[in-house]
Image (cartoon, rainbow, N blue to C red):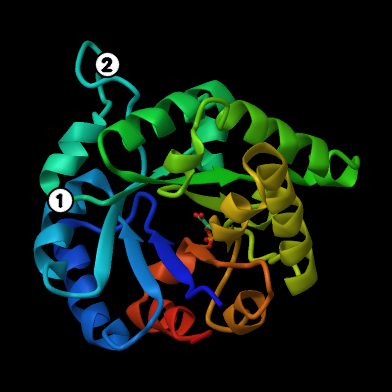
């Protein structure tokens, strides 16, 4: 059985002082877990997070990166800039970026490839909206996101990728997918990767569930056979809640 990968996505929350307080509280709470712990923090908190977590079992991620190494891209951050800071992971294609910032499967692919080239580990988000699920398009949407979003990602590169299945209707809404809904969707996703890369590669791939996971529902979700971890938004902002999720399945 794989250990779980539990990643917190702080989104646009926490000043440097608040980040320091949260990380300082979190370090002892998760120190003895066999699971992998990642915190994906705002750009402005990255230096502080890397420094505070040095020598601990907490890994640091960013929440986006650009596909170019430099140039006239105001407001963007290059993967190598993150790498230089000591960042290990980067969230790519979160639904909030797809919804509010025009992220497409093509830009997700470009950012993922650039992150891999810079030796970062991308956490690539996919997932259907409520309307897509209700109109029976979930499988079509997930298939398109994987075919187009991973088009020229090689099997070797996929070993450094985490996929986060995040149904958009469950993100930040308090509505969680049931344990079975999460597992079924992830099984379906794994099946597409198996078709494209072979069963062994698909089995080794970490696929997280994300969407209103909290200290109350994490145990059930993480116990499901195909759920390899969680990407957690709101509940990652409180050290005790996030630590409870980290420890929910050990
Ligand atoms: C997320 O931001 O990826 C997420 C799943 O958020 P929340 O846990 O708040 O639904």
Label ID, residue 73 = 2
**SS class of the residue under badge 1?**
loop
Residue 123: percent from the left, percent from the top? 44, 48
- Extreme-right residue of the structure: 135
- Ligand 1 contact, mark 2 (Cβ < 8 Å): no
Residue at 74% across, 50% down: 191
Tag 2 secondary structure: loop
Q: Nearer the viewer, mark 1 or mark 2?
A: 1
Instruction: Tell me which label, 1 or 2, sits earlier in the chain.
Output: 2
194 shown above or below 21 = above
**Toward which corner of the image does residue 75 lie, by quadrant?**
top left
Q: Is residue 183 above or below residue 40?
A: below
Whether residue 55 sits left or right of residue 132 in the image: it is left
Number of other residues with Cα within 10 Å of mark 2, as a class: few under 14, some 14 to 19, many 20 or more: few
Q: Is residue 128 left or right of residue 242?
A: right
The verdict on label 1 being within 8 Å of ligand 1 is no
* Residue for point 24% across, 29% down: 78
Residue 218 lies left or right of residue 112; in this view the side is right
At horizontal 74% and vertical 58% (from top left) the residue drawn is 187
Q: Is residue 15 above or below residue 147?
A: below
Instruction: Write down the residue under mark 1.
Output: 86
Image quadrant holding the N terminus, namely bottom right
Q: Is residue 90 visible?
A: yes
Q: Quadrant of residue 55?
A: bottom left
Residue 1 disc label:
none
Residue 165 seen in the current view: no
Q: Position of residue 74 (x, y in %)?
A: 25, 18
Q: Horizontal and vertical percent for residue 225?
A: 68, 73
Q: CA distance from mark 1 to mark 2?
A: 22 Å
Residue 110's x, y, as percent?
43, 24
Q: How many marks?
A: 2
């Amino acid at each position: 059985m794989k250990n779980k990968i539990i990643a917190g996505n702080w989104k646009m929350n926490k000043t440097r002082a608040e980040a320091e307080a949260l990380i300082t509280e979190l370090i002892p709470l998760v120190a003895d877990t066999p699971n992998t712990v990642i915190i994906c923090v705002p750009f402005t908190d990255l230096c502080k997070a890397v420094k505070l977590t040095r020598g601990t079992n907490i890994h640091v991620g960013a929440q986006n990166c650009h596909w170019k190494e430099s140039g006239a891209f105001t407001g963007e951050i290059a993967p190598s800039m993150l790498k230089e800071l000591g960042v290990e992971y980067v969230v790519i294609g979160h639904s909030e970026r797809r919804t509010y910032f025009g992220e497409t499967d093509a830009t997700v692919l470009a950012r993922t490839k650039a992150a891999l080239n810079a030796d970062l580990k991308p956490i690539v988000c996919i997932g259907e909206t409520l309307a897509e699920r209700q109109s029976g398009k979930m499988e079509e949407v997930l298939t398109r996101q994987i075919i187009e979003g991973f088009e020229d990602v090689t099997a070797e590169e996929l070993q450094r990728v985490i996929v986060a299945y995040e149904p958009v209707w469950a993100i930040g809404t308090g509505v969680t997918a049931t344990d079975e809904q999460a597992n079924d969707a992830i099984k379906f996703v794994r099946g597409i990767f198996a078709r494209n890369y072979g069963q062994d590669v698909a089995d080794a791939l970490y696929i997280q569930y994300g969407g209103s996971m909290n200290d109350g529902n994490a145990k059930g979700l993480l116990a499901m056979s195909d759920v390899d971890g969680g990407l957690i938004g709101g509940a990652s902002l409180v050290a005790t809640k996030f630590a409870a999720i980290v420890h929910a399945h050990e």
